Amino acid sequence: MLVEILNLLAVGVALPISKLARELSVSEELMLQMLTDLTQRGYLRLLDTVCQSGCSTCPMANTHAARSAGKTWVLTQKGARLITSFARTTR
Amino acid sequence: MLTGLSQHVGNWPGKTVEQKSGDFVHNGRRIHLVDLPGTYSLTANSEEERIARDFIIHGHPDVVVALVNAASLERNLYLVTELLALPVLLVIGLNMTDVAEQHGIQVEPHVLEAALGAPVVPLVASRNQGLRELMETAEQLAENPGVFTPCRPEIRREHRLVLEEITRLIAGKIPPPYPEDWIALKLLEGDAEIAEMVRRNAPAAWPGIHDLLMQHEDAYLDVAGGRYEWIVRMVRAAVVQPRAGAITLTDRIDRIATHPLWGLLLLLGVFGLTFWLTYTFATPFVEWLEGGLLAPLAEVTGTALAGAPFWISGLVVDGLIGGAGTVLTFLPILIVFFAVLGVLEDVGYLARAAYVMDRFMHWMGLHGKSFMPLFLGFGCNVPAVMGARIIEDRRARLLTILLAPLVPCTARLAVVAFLTPAFFGEAATFVSWGLVAANMIVLAVAGILINRLVFKGEHAAFIMEMPLYHLPNLRTIGLFVWNNSLSFLRKAGTLIVVVSALVWALSVMPGSDIENSLLANIGGWLEPLGSLFGLDDWRLIVALLTSFVAKENTIATLGILYGGGEQAGGLAGRVAATLTPAAGLAFLVVQMLFIPCVATMAVIKQETALWRWTVFSLVLLLVISLGAGVVVYQGAHLLGWGM
């Protein structure tokens, strides 16, 4: 099931958790758990989308729209390597 | 509760984690109960996990009771999958069944028991319900272990063979009481602690094991993936009614909000609505602040300082009130912007906007990972540039940094919102909307070129957590608006005041005639360039230049150079009167695409670590903005519009 998540990411577009959960017929709660697992193993990386510094001179420092996007994960190089190797094996 | 007063509380040997144990008599038999630390797995990532698994392996318990939360069954079952890999007798205590029912989750214990192949006892431990049954079940299992026939997660054949090979290699070399098949499984999962133990105890076999593990680095995905599939099977079998309700409503709205076409149209509509709301609600307040507050203030102050030296009255009335004071008048514009942004954020829409935009940007050939930092740019370009750190590839990161200033920040949008109604009247909403769209088109074209030339069409995906839609919380939005407005006021009271004073000083030196001032000389040098896009007035060029310090300075400078609040007609109106519509549009286009503020440039230098790229960014944006201004003005000239 974890392999399937990485393979779905190979398509290369943004995926909401709800859609990913529907594709794999699991709950969003379990999907979050699996994403955490893949993150701990270095296949995904949890993005820090909240600005931490550098906004001292910006009056809009609090206007970070992505705060509402919740968590966002991206594929790491390790994850991308694995997807490539799966693709080679499938071929 | 089970052990009553005979509970012993201490620490686990050599650890800071609390250990609780106790004895009690059940059915005439003395039972020793050890409460292990709460954990979701046995992977030795934390002290709690290590203590739990060490005790289960070394403590030889007659029965292990796993207390799982029925309201969060999936999350809790992962621990069960790991316990099933150990040679222990297991009873599942299905706790918090009352909470699960309150959430609409009905777990059937008998079905779960049949699916698991292990006894399951429903409980409400907080109310002492089911504890006696749990103890009896555990006792019966200890007396009759033959009934324990658990259904364990499966591993693909390819890795099963590897597992068998590792088990063969470590056979007889692992100190008791570690089960060899469990050790082999943990090695396959990449457990560092177990790997170290095997390396120490089986040095001759280790190179072979290590090679096997290296060849099957992805085995963990198979082992853990098999566990998750097992959890899904168990839940499907035993949970009658999974949660619905709010998710269904969210799904229904998302069918439109995240649709490739409707979602994009909705987003464009939201942009349009934001500008319409700004002009409808904020512009009357801006006009009132200018005419009803700033003009009388300038008049009263001018009268009060009539006897003061020229540089004091000029600095206060023309420099500070006319400059920084005028910037303060667009506070209503920012309040409306922040309120709309706050509502969109609080109801959960912005995450969908990000998703729709990502898809749109893929169509345009932009890199997926670039989207998130670019989206931040609508608030402020500084975090947008810094956000590019999420992109691992250096070239991709660099190009995202170069593109980030093309996203119009709220300060740029506020300047446009201040000037557009005076320039274009009723059509202001459409013009503003078109200016944002134009920025996006420029960004997309640049993105396409960059993607073709550098990324070679590579696309990277990301996963987003979409919050559920909910009604906006007025307090949250109020705080959001308050914090941002306060930041703006702080900036207006510091940076913009300083720049206003400087601009005023340059506009009166060496004499009091503005047309012969140092500023007029600077602007005059650049007038031939400005005339290419219809800006024959050096004051507009100087206003653009001062926006380099902070975007709002465009308004402060115009306020000083076109006369402050003491004059009738409103600043925007006075500026509009000196420009043709084509030149006004060209000015707004240049303002939207112009080099970013100095804070953004400083961050570009910090993130690229090279002056070369900072200068390149500056030149690139100058060429794009001035080029776009020329195209708009000369295009209008050719079409015979707005001249």
Image (cartoon, rainbow, N blue to C red):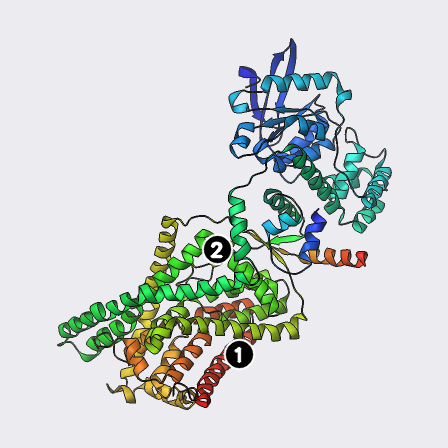
Q: State the image quarter where residue B324 is shown.
A: bottom left
Q: Residue at x 85, y 35 (%)?
A: B171
Residue A6 visible from this viewpoint: yes
Q: State the image quarter where residue B596 is shown.
A: bottom left
Residue B118: percent from left, percent from top: 71, 26
Looking at the picture, do discs 1 and 2 lie on one chain? yes
Residue B379 visible from this viewpoint: no
On screen, residue B424 above or below A67: below
On screen, residue A46 above or below B635: above
Q: State the image quarter where residue B636 is shown.
A: bottom left
Looking at the rendered structure, the secondary structure element under dot 1 is helix
Q: List the residue tagged with mark 1.
A: B620
On screen, residue B489 above or below B201: below
Residue B508: percent from left, percent from top: 27, 83
**Mark 1: few/some/many CA within 10 Å (<14, 14-19, 20+):** some
Q: Nearer the viewer, residue B409 or B265?
A: B265
On screen, residue B89 above or below B236: above
Quarter in which the N terminus of chain B is drawn: top right
Looking at the rendered structure, the secondary structure element under dot 2 is helix
Mark 1 or 2, which is nearer the eye? 2
Give the distance between the C-alpha atoms of the residues marked 1 and 2, in whole angstroms: 33 Å
Q: Residue at x 44, y 78 (%)?
A: B589
- Residue type at mark 2 is Tyr
Residue B349's mark?
A: 2
Q: What subunit carries mark 1?
A: B
Residue B544's mark?
A: none
Q: Nearer the viewer, residue B564 or B342?
A: B342
